[in-house]
Amino acid sequence: MKKLMAFAALAVLASGCVFMRPTNAMAPIELNVVSPDTRFIDNSVQPVKKGTATASGIVCFTEGDASIKKAMENGGITKIHHVDYEVKNIFGIVGSTTTIVWGE
């Protein structure tokens, strides 16, 4: 019985729940936390267009495409100036990540 309980606990812990991209501020509840991704800053490109892509989830189920490529497609962007991420997370139960791409 103890082995079964240990296996069940391990299965729940390893299920992946809703873990979002790390931000500058980590807390059990995160609402509207925006973090920049400085790897993409290109000052030769003007940030005149904005594209977003979102992935969201609840408990062990997530859906959506929060990739930079999808955000670029949604905003009609071909050159990136910079990328931001907006994270919402409530105790790892409900959460979403939005990738925000700025460029032209």
Image (spheres, rainbow, N blue to C red):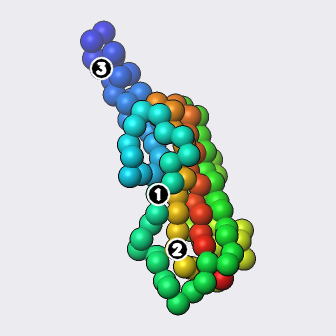
Q: Earlier in the sequence, mark 1 or mark 3?
A: 3
Which residue ends up furthest to the left in the rendered image? 2
Which numbered tag is attached to residue 6? 3
Task: Answer whether labels 2 and 3 touch (C-beta < 8 Å).
Answer: no
Indicate the secondary structure of the residue bearing disc 2: strand
Indicate the secondary structure of the residue bearing disc 3: helix
**Residue denoted by label 2:** 82
Give residue 93's position: percent from left, percent from top: 52, 31
Against 7, is 46 above or below? Answer: below
Indicate the secondary structure of the residue bearing disc 1: strand
**Residue denoted by label 1:** 35
Q: Earlier in the sequence, mark 1 or mark 2?
A: 1
Task: Write down the quadrant of residue 74 in the picture.
Answer: bottom right
Q: Residue at x 59, y 63 (%)?
A: 100
Q: Earlier in the sequence, mark 2 or mark 3?
A: 3
Please tell me how many numbered marks the rendered image carries: 3
Give residue 104's position: percent from left, percent from top: 66, 82
Q: Residue at x 52, y 74 (%)?
A: 82
Against 92, is 25 above or below? Answer: below
Q: Quadrant of the N terminus?
A: top left
Q: Observer-nearest residue: 11 or 99?
A: 99
Closer mark to the observer between disc 2 and disc 3: 2
Q: Residue at x 55, y 53 (%)?
A: 86
Q: Amino acid at mark 1?
A: Ser
Against 82, is 13 above or below? Answer: above
Closer mark to the observer between disc 1 and disc 3: 1
78 relative position to 33: left or right: right
Asked if one can make out residue 90 in the rendered structure from this viewpoint, the answer is: yes
How crowded pointer 1 is (Cα within 10 Å; few <14, some 14-19, many 20+) is rated as some
Give residue 34's position: percent from left, percent from top: 51, 54
